[in-house]
Image (spheres, grey):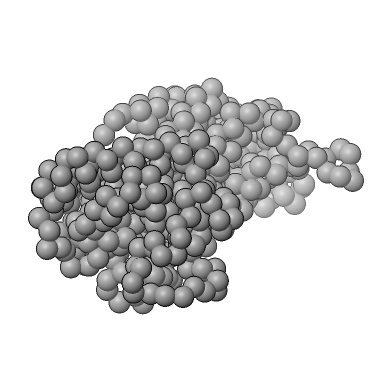
Amino acid sequence: MSGATGTNAAPHDEQVWHGWLTGNSSLLEEINASVRFDHRLARHDIDGSIAHARMLAARRVITEQEADAIVAGLELVREEIRTGAFTFDPALEDVHMNVEARLRTLIGPVAGRLHTARSRNDQVAVDTRMWVRDAIDRLDALLARLITVIAVRAEAHHGDVMPGFTHLQCAQPVTIGHHLLAYGEMLLRDRDRLRSARRRLDESPLGAAALAGTVHPVDPEDTARRLGFGRVFRNSLDAVSDRDFILDYLSAGATLAVHLSRLGEELVIWSTPQFGFIELPEHLCAGSSIMPQKRNPDLPELMRAKSGRVFGDLMALLTVMKGLPLAYSRDMQEDKEALFDAADTLEVSVRAAEAMLRGITFRTRKTRADAALGNAVATDLADWLVADRSLPFREAHTVVAGLVKWLGVQGKELKDAAPGDLAGFDERFATLPAEVLTVEHAVTRRNSPGGTAPALVREAAAELHRRNTETD
Ligand code: ARG
């Protein structure tokens, strides 16, 4: 970004509303100018203008020669922006005016024909839709890569046992693969939410003009087609005045951020010596300026924390929109910083998650040992009483609860007990096979649909990969 004076800065008398507004206020510029951030729409703004100019020529609102001059000029502006030669000027408010002013400098007064049958209201609406469409595609592609890594790592650890928790208390053993695949499911749904947001935004608002349509014979179908939109707006007021397509993206993003945050939290706790489930990749760890031994999980901590920004961005835009009368109000300009911030945040967070999941090492001896802590096979014992001794489950539950208490008084857990010890507590355990007390047995037997049994996890990993790569 540059200062107020640039090569394309139009003198005041060239401003678009020349003849109507006079005077200049630096306060107005400070609060009103958006080019500092909306320059990120430049490419889409130029695409939208080219489509509009071609449509105007096709409908004979302007001549082919005029359209050719406009398009050639816009391509020059695009090139200047691409190479960094372009200077955005806050005195020209926003990206739309900056591009148009430069076009005028380059090709002269014919540039003024471009804005026939168009307002900045439908211009910004179409630009932002195209920007969000690209942001969705980028995020979706990053998510697909992350899910691929999850499927690969889940397959590799389909048989490695770890503790499964509820309330963060040892509950029942699961496999590492199964735990990872849970995130795969969440993230596949995130992809689905993004794609459904994309389907809804696939509607061009160009041709709505300021709010009411236009007296010129525009062809919104034509501009929509040129810009790759599947549909055209049906109501000009709606076309320029809703930002629900951004809210859709932000809310899908907020849910994704929740998932990444939970994953980040698990990586943080798993990497502590107390858990010791994983080794973090050294190149993704940060050190401490005072404690020489430290290897801090800053990256997963930030995966956890960045969610706050995305929630804030969603909340900001909901709040901006909630009381606005139809149609456009300048309030809507506040959509962009939230949108850009959320997109940047989500993209870096997904990339961070991918790098982490690629880089961590599971300490499978430790996870297996911890899986047996906290009487984690208690349910298996109760289930054995049900299946082999025909007890009603409620009764079996009471028997095992008593057993666990009885062992606890002796400072023992189920993992320390032999079937003989159990028979001392209740003779119905006399025929208990020793394997029922093992965590391997616990996971292998949980082969109900969607369960943690290694064979199922292996299939589920392959299935996740297939679902992730299938095109809709
Ligand atoms: N920069 C403005 C925005 O982002 C463009 C639309 C301005 N329209 C207007 N009528 N002032 O919302």
**Where 13 falls versus 113 (above or below)?**
below
Q: Residue at x 39, y 38 (%)?
A: 76
In the rendered picture of this protein, how many numbered marks are placed on residues? 0
Closer to us: 246 or 251:
246
Report x, y in % for residue 184.
45, 37
The correct choice, above or below, for 189 with respect to 209 in the image is above
Residue 287 in view here = yes
- What quarter of the picture does the C terminus occupy? top left
Apparent side of residue 223 relative to residue 19 in the rendered image (left or right): left
Residue drawn at (42%, 75%) of the image: 22
Residue 86 location (% of width, % of height): 49, 44
Please state which of residues 139 and 324 is positioned toward the viewer in this rendering. 324
- Residue 229 as seen in the image, left or right of residue 333: left
Seen in the image, is 468 located left or right of residue 415?
A: left
The residue depicted at 39 percent of the width and 61 percent of the height is: 14
Q: Position of residue 169 (x, y in %)?
A: 63, 50
Q: Residue furthest top?
A: 156
Q: Is residue 70 left or right of residue 153?
A: left
Compared with residue 85, is residue 61 higher up or lower down, i.e. above or below?
Answer: below
Q: Which of 302/224 is in front?
A: 224
Q: Is residue 259 in view?
A: no
The answer to which image quadrant residue 463 occupies is top left
Residue at 66% of width from left, 48% of height from top?
301
Instruction: Examine the image and state in which quarter residue 46 appears.
Output: top left
Q: Nearer the viewer, residue 249 or 44?
A: 44
Q: Where is residue 159 shown, x and y percent of the image?
A: 54, 25
